[in-house]
Amino acid sequence: MEKRELLYEGKAKKVFATDDENVLLVDYKDDATAFNGLKKGTIAGKGEINNRVTNFMMKLLEKEGVKTHYVEELSNRETLVKRVSIVPLEVIIRNISAGSFAKRYGTEEGIVFDEPTIEFSYKNDDLGDPLINAYHAIALKLATKEEIEKIKAMAFKVNDVMKEFFAGIGIDLVDFKLEFGRLSDGEIVLADEISPDTCRFWDSKTHEKLDKDRFRRDLGNVEDAYNEMMKRIFSK
Ligand code: TMP
Protein backbone atom coordinates (compact mmCIF):
# COMPACT_ATOMS: atom_id res chain seq x y z
CA MET A 1 0.00 0.00 0.00
CA GLU A 2 1.38 3.38 -0.99
CA LYS A 3 1.46 6.34 1.44
CA ARG A 4 0.02 9.45 -0.26
CA GLU A 5 -0.95 12.96 0.82
CA LEU A 6 -1.43 14.17 4.40
CA LEU A 7 -5.18 14.50 4.95
CA TYR A 8 -5.28 15.63 8.55
CA GLU A 9 -2.92 16.38 11.40
CA GLY A 10 -4.32 16.09 14.91
CA LYS A 11 -2.71 16.62 18.30
CA ALA A 12 -1.24 13.10 18.52
CA LYS A 13 -1.55 11.59 15.04
CA LYS A 14 -1.23 12.32 11.33
CA VAL A 15 -3.58 10.70 8.84
CA PHE A 16 -2.48 10.03 5.26
CA ALA A 17 -4.36 8.85 2.18
CA THR A 18 -3.23 5.63 0.48
CA ASP A 19 -3.73 4.26 -3.02
CA ASP A 20 -6.87 2.51 -1.71
CA GLU A 21 -9.62 5.09 -1.15
CA ASN A 22 -11.14 2.96 1.62
CA VAL A 23 -7.90 2.71 3.60
CA LEU A 24 -6.02 5.41 5.53
CA LEU A 25 -2.57 5.40 7.13
CA VAL A 26 -2.25 6.67 10.71
CA ASP A 27 1.16 7.91 11.90
CA TYR A 28 1.49 8.34 15.70
CA LYS A 29 3.49 11.30 17.07
CA ASP A 30 5.35 11.79 20.36
CA ASP A 31 3.54 15.13 20.85
CA ALA A 32 1.32 15.36 23.91
CA THR A 33 -1.30 17.95 24.78
CA ALA A 34 -3.75 18.36 27.62
CA PHE A 35 -6.60 20.69 28.55
CA ASN A 36 -7.73 21.20 24.95
CA GLY A 37 -4.20 21.91 23.72
CA LEU A 38 -3.35 24.48 26.43
CA LYS A 39 -0.54 22.33 27.81
CA LYS A 40 1.97 21.06 25.26
CA GLY A 41 4.91 18.68 25.48
CA THR A 42 6.64 15.61 24.14
CA ILE A 43 6.65 12.12 25.56
CA ALA A 44 9.65 10.31 24.03
CA GLY A 45 8.62 7.00 22.46
CA LYS A 46 4.89 7.64 22.97
CA GLY A 47 4.04 7.38 19.27
CA GLU A 48 5.46 3.90 19.02
CA ILE A 49 3.89 2.74 22.29
CA ASN A 50 0.43 4.12 21.47
CA ASN A 51 0.53 2.62 17.99
CA ARG A 52 1.52 -0.84 19.20
CA VAL A 53 -0.75 -0.81 22.27
CA THR A 54 -3.74 0.37 20.22
CA ASN A 55 -3.21 -2.35 17.64
CA PHE A 56 -2.82 -4.99 20.34
CA MET A 57 -6.14 -3.91 21.89
CA MET A 58 -7.96 -3.67 18.53
CA LYS A 59 -6.87 -7.22 17.66
CA LEU A 60 -7.96 -8.52 21.07
CA LEU A 61 -11.35 -6.79 20.70
CA GLU A 62 -11.85 -8.14 17.16
CA LYS A 63 -11.22 -11.65 18.54
CA GLU A 64 -13.96 -10.99 21.10
CA GLY A 65 -16.44 -9.92 18.41
CA VAL A 66 -16.05 -6.11 18.47
CA LYS A 67 -15.79 -4.68 14.94
CA THR A 68 -12.95 -2.13 14.59
CA HIS A 69 -11.31 -0.01 11.90
CA TYR A 70 -7.99 -1.90 12.26
CA VAL A 71 -6.38 -3.29 9.08
CA GLU A 72 -2.62 -3.81 9.50
CA GLU A 73 0.39 -2.54 11.44
CA LEU A 74 2.99 -1.26 8.96
CA SER A 75 5.77 -0.13 11.26
CA ASN A 76 6.34 0.87 14.87
CA ARG A 77 4.43 4.12 14.34
CA GLU A 78 2.29 3.49 11.26
CA THR A 79 -0.94 1.54 10.88
CA LEU A 80 -3.48 1.05 8.11
CA VAL A 81 -7.10 1.54 9.10
CA LYS A 82 -10.43 1.50 7.29
CA ARG A 83 -11.68 4.94 6.28
CA VAL A 84 -14.59 5.94 8.48
CA SER A 85 -16.54 9.10 9.12
CA ILE A 86 -16.01 9.72 12.81
CA VAL A 87 -19.11 10.10 15.00
CA PRO A 88 -18.27 13.39 16.76
CA LEU A 89 -18.70 11.98 20.25
CA GLU A 90 -16.12 11.03 22.85
CA VAL A 91 -17.54 7.98 24.58
CA ILE A 92 -16.26 7.66 28.14
CA ILE A 93 -16.64 4.58 30.32
CA ARG A 94 -15.74 4.70 34.01
CA ASN A 95 -15.25 1.88 36.52
CA ILE A 96 -13.67 3.97 39.31
CA SER A 97 -14.10 7.67 40.13
CA ALA A 98 -11.32 9.93 38.81
CA GLY A 99 -10.64 13.04 36.75
CA SER A 100 -13.57 15.17 35.61
CA PHE A 101 -16.11 12.83 37.28
CA ALA A 102 -14.55 13.36 40.72
CA LYS A 103 -14.24 17.09 40.06
CA ARG A 104 -17.79 17.57 38.74
CA TYR A 105 -19.50 15.67 41.55
CA GLY A 106 -17.11 16.65 44.35
CA THR A 107 -16.05 13.10 45.19
CA GLU A 108 -12.64 11.66 45.92
CA GLU A 109 -10.84 9.62 43.27
CA GLY A 110 -10.72 5.84 43.65
CA ILE A 111 -14.34 4.98 44.50
CA VAL A 112 -15.10 1.66 42.79
CA PHE A 113 -18.53 1.76 41.13
CA ASP A 114 -21.02 -1.12 41.39
CA GLU A 115 -21.74 -0.69 37.67
CA PRO A 116 -19.68 1.00 34.96
CA THR A 117 -20.93 4.43 33.80
CA ILE A 118 -21.09 5.87 30.30
CA GLU A 119 -21.08 9.49 29.17
CA PHE A 120 -20.62 11.41 25.95
CA SER A 121 -18.72 14.56 25.08
CA TYR A 122 -19.37 16.52 21.91
CA LYS A 123 -16.09 16.48 19.94
CA ASN A 124 -15.74 20.19 19.28
CA ASP A 125 -12.47 21.94 20.19
CA ASP A 126 -14.01 25.44 19.94
CA LEU A 127 -16.56 24.50 22.60
CA GLY A 128 -14.02 22.55 24.70
CA ASP A 129 -15.65 19.13 24.11
CA PRO A 130 -18.71 19.75 26.34
CA LEU A 131 -20.56 16.94 28.09
CA ILE A 132 -23.69 16.05 26.09
CA ASN A 133 -26.56 13.63 26.65
CA ALA A 134 -27.90 11.15 24.11
CA TYR A 135 -31.04 13.21 23.40
CA HIS A 136 -28.96 16.29 22.61
CA ALA A 137 -26.61 14.25 20.42
CA ILE A 138 -29.63 12.98 18.44
CA ALA A 139 -31.15 16.51 18.28
CA LEU A 140 -27.85 17.83 16.89
CA LYS A 141 -27.85 14.93 14.38
CA LEU A 142 -24.44 13.77 15.60
CA ALA A 143 -25.80 10.22 15.58
CA THR A 144 -29.13 8.44 15.25
CA LYS A 145 -30.92 6.78 18.15
CA GLU A 146 -30.01 3.36 16.73
CA GLU A 147 -26.35 4.38 16.42
CA ILE A 148 -26.28 5.59 20.03
CA GLU A 149 -27.73 2.25 21.22
CA LYS A 150 -25.14 0.34 19.16
CA ILE A 151 -22.30 2.52 20.45
CA LYS A 152 -23.40 2.02 24.07
CA ALA A 153 -23.54 -1.76 23.68
CA MET A 154 -20.13 -1.84 21.97
CA ALA A 155 -18.54 0.45 24.58
CA PHE A 156 -19.70 -1.75 27.49
CA LYS A 157 -18.46 -4.85 25.66
CA VAL A 158 -15.06 -3.15 25.17
CA ASN A 159 -15.04 -2.46 28.91
CA ASP A 160 -15.75 -6.11 29.78
CA VAL A 161 -12.91 -7.33 27.55
CA MET A 162 -10.40 -4.68 28.59
CA LYS A 163 -11.14 -4.84 32.34
CA GLU A 164 -10.46 -8.56 32.34
CA PHE A 165 -7.33 -8.25 30.22
CA PHE A 166 -5.82 -5.47 32.35
CA ALA A 167 -6.70 -7.25 35.62
CA GLY A 168 -4.54 -10.12 34.30
CA ILE A 169 -1.50 -7.82 34.10
CA GLY A 170 -2.03 -6.20 37.50
CA ILE A 171 -3.79 -3.07 36.25
CA ASP A 172 -7.09 -1.52 37.36
CA LEU A 173 -8.85 -0.04 34.32
CA VAL A 174 -10.18 3.18 35.90
CA ASP A 175 -11.75 4.83 32.85
CA PHE A 176 -11.18 5.37 29.13
CA LYS A 177 -12.37 7.25 26.07
CA LEU A 178 -13.49 5.62 22.81
CA GLU A 179 -14.41 6.99 19.40
CA PHE A 180 -16.58 5.28 16.81
CA GLY A 181 -16.88 5.70 13.05
CA ARG A 182 -19.17 4.74 10.19
CA LEU A 183 -17.90 2.60 7.32
CA SER A 184 -19.10 3.52 3.82
CA ASP A 185 -22.09 1.20 4.28
CA GLY A 186 -22.99 2.89 7.58
CA GLU A 187 -21.80 0.11 9.89
CA ILE A 188 -20.52 1.42 13.23
CA VAL A 189 -16.98 0.31 14.13
CA LEU A 190 -14.57 1.17 16.92
CA ALA A 191 -11.98 3.71 15.67
CA ASP A 192 -9.22 6.02 16.94
CA GLU A 193 -6.86 4.70 19.65
CA ILE A 194 -6.75 2.83 22.96
CA SER A 195 -3.58 3.77 24.81
CA PRO A 196 -2.16 5.35 27.97
CA ASP A 197 -3.24 8.68 26.37
CA THR A 198 -6.89 7.67 26.38
CA CYS A 199 -7.23 5.38 29.41
CA ARG A 200 -6.49 5.66 33.13
CA PHE A 201 -4.41 2.72 34.30
CA TRP A 202 -3.64 2.26 38.00
CA ASP A 203 -1.35 -0.46 39.34
CA SER A 204 -3.69 -2.85 41.18
CA LYS A 205 -1.45 -3.14 44.25
CA THR A 206 0.30 0.24 44.61
CA HIS A 207 -2.36 2.35 42.79
CA GLU A 208 0.52 4.08 40.97
CA LYS A 209 -0.74 5.99 37.91
CA LEU A 210 0.60 4.49 34.66
CA ASP A 211 -1.01 6.78 32.08
CA LYS A 212 -1.19 10.33 30.71
CA ASP A 213 -2.26 11.77 34.06
CA ARG A 214 1.50 11.77 34.86
CA PHE A 215 1.85 14.38 32.08
CA ARG A 216 -1.43 16.24 32.76
CA ARG A 217 -0.64 16.60 36.47
CA ASP A 218 3.18 16.97 36.24
CA LEU A 219 3.78 13.83 38.29
CA GLY A 220 7.12 12.98 36.62
CA ASN A 221 8.34 9.62 35.21
CA VAL A 222 5.94 9.96 32.28
CA GLU A 223 8.03 7.87 29.87
CA ASP A 224 8.59 5.21 32.55
CA ALA A 225 4.82 4.81 32.94
CA TYR A 226 4.24 4.37 29.19
CA ASN A 227 7.14 1.90 28.99
CA GLU A 228 5.81 -0.08 31.96
CA MET A 229 2.37 -0.40 30.34
CA MET A 230 3.94 -1.52 27.06
CA LYS A 231 6.07 -4.10 28.88
CA ARG A 232 3.14 -5.56 30.80
CA ILE A 233 0.81 -5.68 27.79
CA PHE A 234 3.37 -7.41 25.57
CA SER A 235 4.39 -9.88 28.28
CA LYS A 236 0.97 -11.55 27.76
P1 TMP B 1 -11.83 12.85 32.26
O1 TMP B 1 -11.92 12.28 33.64
O2 TMP B 1 -10.86 14.00 32.16
O3 TMP B 1 -13.18 13.20 31.71
O4 TMP B 1 -11.24 11.71 31.33
C1 TMP B 1 -11.88 10.45 31.21
C2 TMP B 1 -11.04 9.53 30.33
O5 TMP B 1 -10.99 9.99 29.01
C3 TMP B 1 -9.58 9.40 30.78
O6 TMP B 1 -9.22 8.02 30.70
C4 TMP B 1 -8.80 10.20 29.80
C5 TMP B 1 -9.64 10.18 28.55
N1 TMP B 1 -9.60 11.43 27.80
C6 TMP B 1 -9.19 11.43 26.48
O7 TMP B 1 -8.84 10.38 25.94
N2 TMP B 1 -9.18 12.61 25.80
C7 TMP B 1 -9.57 13.78 26.35
O8 TMP B 1 -9.53 14.80 25.68
C8 TMP B 1 -10.00 13.76 27.72
C9 TMP B 1 -10.42 15.03 28.39
C10 TMP B 1 -10.01 12.57 28.40
Image: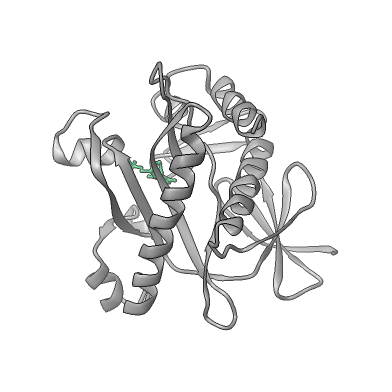
Quick check: 129 above or below 42?
Answer: below
Residue drawn where x is 70% and y is 65% of the image: 24
Q: Residue furthest right?
A: 2
Quick check: 101 above or below 85?
Answer: above
Quadrant of the rendering where the C terminus is positioned: top right
The reply, left or right, for residue 83 in relation to residue 194 is right
Q: Position of residue 82 (x, y in %)?
A: 66, 67
Q: Residue furthest bottom?
A: 185
Tell me if residue 144 can be seen: no
Q: Position of residue 180 (x, y in %)?
A: 48, 64
Tell me if residue 169 can be seen: yes
Q: Tell me where residue 31 sits by quadrant.
A: top right
Q: How many marks?
A: 0
Residue drawn where x is 35% and y is 71% of the image: 148
Residue drawn where x is 38% and y is 21% of the image: 207
Q: Position of residue 222 (x, y in %)?
A: 53, 23
Tell which quarter ligand 1 is in: top left
The reply, left or right, for residue 17 in relation to residue 214 is right
